[in-house]
Amino acid sequence: MTNTTDLHNFLRTRRSIRHFKPDSVPDSVIQNILTTATFAPSAHNRQPWRFCVVTDLSVKTKLANAMAVEFERDLEKDKLPLAEIQKRIARSRARMIAAPVAIILNVDMSDMDVYPDEKRNKAEYLMAVQSVANAGMQMLLAAHAEGLGGVWVCSPLFVQGIIQNVLDLPKTWEPQAMFFLGYPVDIPEARERKSIQDISIFI
C-alpha cells in the first residue's frame, strides 16, 4: 500500500503538459480515467459532470477551426496587432489538433435543485460548477496515474454555443472546460508556489 509521503509526492508531481507524443491513448485507459473522475465529490451527490471525448482528427480540426473564428473576433476587439492575433490563433489550433485526446467537460443542471428565488438558484449553479471542477481535477490526477500528461483550458467558456453545435451535444450540456491528454514529450519543472503563510489564516 502506498504510504502518505509517496502519495503527497505523486500529487505534487502533476504538471500541466502542453506538448504530446503522437501516440494514441487506448480506449481502456480513457475509460479508466473517466471512471476515476466520477468518484469526485459533488453537491447532493448529483454528479452533474458530463464528458465528451474527442479523438478523431477531423472532428478536432473542425472544432479548432470553429473556435478560432470566435477567438479571432475577440482578439480583434482587444486591438492586438494582426501578427500577434495570427500567432495566438495558430498556437491554439495546433495545440488542440496535436493532442491525442481532447475532453470537453460540461455541467448539466438537469438533476440539480430548483428554487423559487434567484439567490439559491445561483448558489445551486455554482455548486454544480464546483462539482464539475472537482471531477476535472480528479481526471487530471487519474491521467497522471496512467503516465499521461494533461492540461486544463477554459476556452470553452467563451464559445459554449459553438462547441455545442459542432459536437452536437445535448442541449442541457454546458461546456465549462477542455482537457488535452496524451503521453508527454517532456515534464517541466514545478513552478514556484506561494507560501502557505501568505495564503492561509489559521484561527
Image (cartoon, helix red, strand yellow):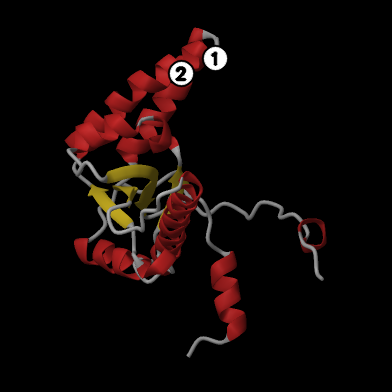
Observer-nearest residue: 100 or 130?
Answer: 130
Residue 33 in which image quadrant: bottom left
What residue appears at the point 21 percent right and 32 percent down from the top-left corner? 165
Q: Is residue 132 above or below residue 78?
A: below
Residue 74, how many percent across, how many down? 46, 18
Three-letter code for the amino acid on which mark 1 is drawn: Asp
**Image position of 140 (left or right of 199):** left
Residue 130, how many percent across, how many down? 48, 56
Residue 42 appears in the picture as rendered: no
Q: Residues within 10 Å of mark 2 (few under 14, many from 20)?
A: some
Q: Secondary structure at mark 2?
A: helix
Q: Give the residue at mark 2.
A: 74
Q: Residues within 10 Å of mark 1 (few under 14, many from 20)?
A: few
What residue appears at the point 78 percent right and 59 percent down from the top-left corner? 195
Q: Secondary structure at mark 1?
A: loop
Residue 159, how many percent across, how many down? 36, 30
Q: Give the residue at mark 1.
A: 78
**Marks 2 and 1, how far apart at CA:** 6 Å
Question: Which image quarter is the C terminus in?
Answer: bottom right
